[in-house]
Image (tube, helix red, strand yellow):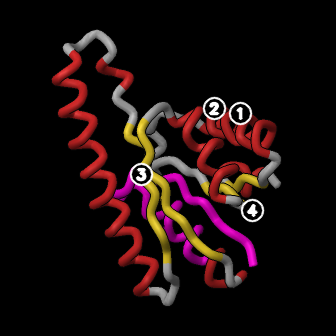
Amino acid sequence: MGKILCATRGGEASFRTQDKAIALAKDQGDELIFLFVADVSFLDNTAAPVVVDIEQEMVQMGEFLLAMAQERAAAQGVRAQQVVRRGKLRIELPAAAKELGATLIVIGRPADRHGVFDAETLHTFADYLRDVTGIKVWAPEIEERE
């Protein structure tokens, strides 16, 4: 039995990625873990007390969004765990994947294609994750290329 780690921001824009992770977990009988990374690095020039408050709010928001993802998985017969980490996605995602013993990392981006990653950037990030973790990565654009 494997362990799928699905990085998600939560909400409707992430449903496609979550649905893929849920389907893979169901089809393969794998464990499923949803990951949310609370990254407040955009506040680097802000007073420390404000950053602490905002970071805590982001963590609570992440917990809520992951609870919704867990409910979506449960509705499809898949039990999922949730993990919220603080820091930068590029650091926290591979660290969590290694620590949790993931056998597959699932990443995505909004279906409207106006997110942070364009297809090439997403592909490069997936390659980076594979290189630093040794773990297989699934992303929609990668699947479409293969």
Q: Is residue 19 magenta?
A: yes
The tag on residue 38 is none
Q: Residue at x 67, y 68 (%)?
A: 3
Identify which residue is drawn at 73% across, 57% down. 143
Residue at numbered disc 1:
124
Kind of residue at disc 2? Thr
Q: What distance separates the C-alpha of mark 4 from that of mark 1?
A: 19 Å
Q: Give the mark nearest the N terminus, 4 or 1.
A: 4
Residue 140 in sight: no
Q: Are marks 2 and 1 in contact (CB under 8 Å)?
A: yes
Q: Are marks 4 and 2 in contact (CB under 8 Å)?
A: no
Check the image and report above or below for 112 versus 122. below
Which residue, given by chain and number where applicable, does mark 4 sit on?
Answer: 103
- Marks 4 and 2, the one that precedes in the sequence: 4
Q: Which residue in the structure is indicated by mark 2?
A: 121
**Label drawn at residue 84:** 3
Image quadrant where one finds the C terminus = bottom right
Between marks 2 and 1, how big is the CA–CA gap? 5 Å
The x and y percentages for residue 21 are 58, 68
Among numbered discs 3 and 2, the one appearing first in the sequence: 3
- Comparing marks 4 and 1, which lies closer to the viewer? 4
Residues in magenta, as a range? 1-23
